[in-house]
C-alpha cells in the first residue's frame, strides 16, 4: 500500500513530534513485506534494532530511581514494560497499525493487528525519533506512552515473569519443572525469529515466538498458562 508523508500528519500530532525527516518516519512504518519488488525502499528492522536498545536504556534509567527495590524486582518491571504484548497495546492506542506500509498479502493476513508487527513498529518509531531528534525526544516519548503505564502494570500483576509463574504452578500441581526447546529459527542474523516449545516432561504443552530465545520462551509460558488445567 502506497502512502505519502502527508498521511502521517495525524500520527505526528498524536505523538506530539513533528519529524524533520519524513522519509525516516516512513521507513519506521515500513514492514519488510512492503519492500519486495520495490528497489531502494528500506524496511524498519534496523530502526527496530536501534529503538529496542534506546527503549531498554530509557526504561532502565527510569527504574533506577526506585532505590528501595532490589534488582530482581526491577528486572521483572523492565521486562513487563518492554514486553511485546505491552508495546503492541500502546501501538494500538496511537493507531500505529493504520499507518503501516504492508504488502497486500501481509495486510490480508491481519498484519495490521499482529502483536509482533505492532511492537516492532513501535520500537522502530522510537529508533526513528532518536535519529531525527535525539535522546531527550525519544525519552520523552517513552515516558509519555510507556513508563506512564507502570502503575497499571503493577496493579494488574502483569510484572510477574510468565516463566516463573508457570514453573510455580507446574511444580505445585504436577511436581514437574517445565523446560523449553527452540523448535524453529527464521530470518536474517540481525532479525532472527525464534519459536520455542514449553514441555512438561515429554509432553509439549505450548509454543511461543519472539525475536529472542528468551522472549519466545516467555510467550510459550504465557500460552501454557492459558490452558484449562491451570484455571
Image: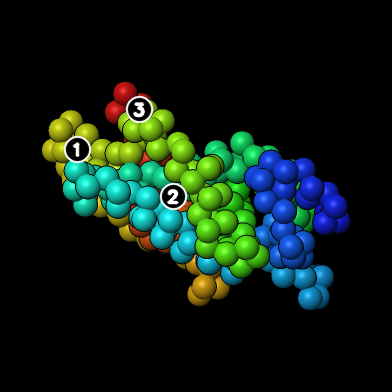
Contact between labelled residues 3 and 2, with CB atoms less than 8 Å apart? no
Distance CA(mark 2)–CA(mark 3):
17 Å
Numbered disc in front, either 3 or 1: 3
Image-quadrant location for residue 77: top left
Name which residue lies at 29% across and 28% down. 230
Numbered disc in front, either 1 or 2: 2
Residue furthest front in the image:
136
Badge 3: few (under 14), some or many (20 or more) residues near its Cα, within 10 Å? few
Number of the label disc, if any, that sits on residue 129: none
Name which residue lies at 16% across and 38% down. 171
* Coloration of the structure image: rainbow
Residue 155 visible here: yes
Left or right: 1 in relation to 18: right
Contact between labelled residues 1 and 3, with CB atoms less than 8 Å apart? no
Q: Quadrant of the N terminus?
A: bottom right
Q: Which element carries disc 3, helix, strand or loop? A: helix
Image-quadrant location for residue 90: top right
Q: Quadrant of the C terminus?
A: top left
The residue wearing badge 2 is: 82
Q: Position of residue 185 (x, y in %)?
A: 47, 65
Name which residue lies at 86% across and 56% down. 4
Q: Position of residue 26 (x, y in %)?
A: 74, 60
Q: Which element carries disc 2, helix, strand or loop? A: helix
Is 56 or 21 nearer to us in this picture? 21
Left or right: 148 in relation to 16: left
Distance CA(mark 1)–CA(mark 2):
23 Å
Distance CA(mark 3)–CA(mark 1):
21 Å
The residue wearing badge 1 is: 168
Left or right: 49 in relation to 198: right
The residue wearing badge 3 is: 155
Name which residue lies at 25% across and 52% down. 179
Amino acid at each position: 500500500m502506497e502512502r505519502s508523508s502527508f498521511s502521517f500528519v495525524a500520527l505526528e500530532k498524536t505523538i506530539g513530534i513533528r519529524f524533520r525527516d519524513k522519509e525516516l518516519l516512513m521507513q519506521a512504518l515500513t514492514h519488510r513485506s512492503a519492500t519486495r519488488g520495490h528497489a531502494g525502499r528500506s524496511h524498519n528492522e534496523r530502526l527496530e534494532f536501534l529503538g529496542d536498545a534506546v527503549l531498554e536504556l530509557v526504561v532502565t534509567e527510569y527504574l533506577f530511581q526506585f532505590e528501595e527495590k532490589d534488582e530482581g524486582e526491577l528486572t521483572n518491571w523492565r521486562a513487563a514494560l518492554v514486553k511485546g504484548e505491552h508495546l503492541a497495546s500502546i501501538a494500538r492506542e496511537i493507531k500505529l497499525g493504520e499507518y503501516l506500509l504492508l504488502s497486500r498479502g501481509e495486510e490480508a493476513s491481519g498484519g495490521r493487528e499482529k502483536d509482533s508487527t505492532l511492537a516492532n513498529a513501535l520500537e522502530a518509531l522510537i529508533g526513528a525519533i532518536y535519529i531525527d531528534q535525539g535522546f531527550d525526544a525519544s525519552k520523552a516519548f517513552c515516558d509519555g506512552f510507556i513508563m506512564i503505564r507502570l502503575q497499571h502494570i503493577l496493579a494488574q500483576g502483569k510484572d510477574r515473569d510468565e516463566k516463573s509463574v508457570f514453573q510455580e504452578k507446574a511444580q505445585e500441581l504436577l511436581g514437574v519443572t517445565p523446560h523449553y526447546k527452540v523448535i524453529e529459527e527464521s530470518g536474517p542474523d540481525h532479525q532472527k525469529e525464534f519459536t520455542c516449545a514449553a514441555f512438561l516432561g515429554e509432553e509439549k504443552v505450548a509454543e511461543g515466538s519472539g525475536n529472542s530465545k528468551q522472549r519466545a520462551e516467555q510467550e510459550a509460558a504465557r500460552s501454557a498458562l492459558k490452558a484449562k488445567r491451570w484455571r
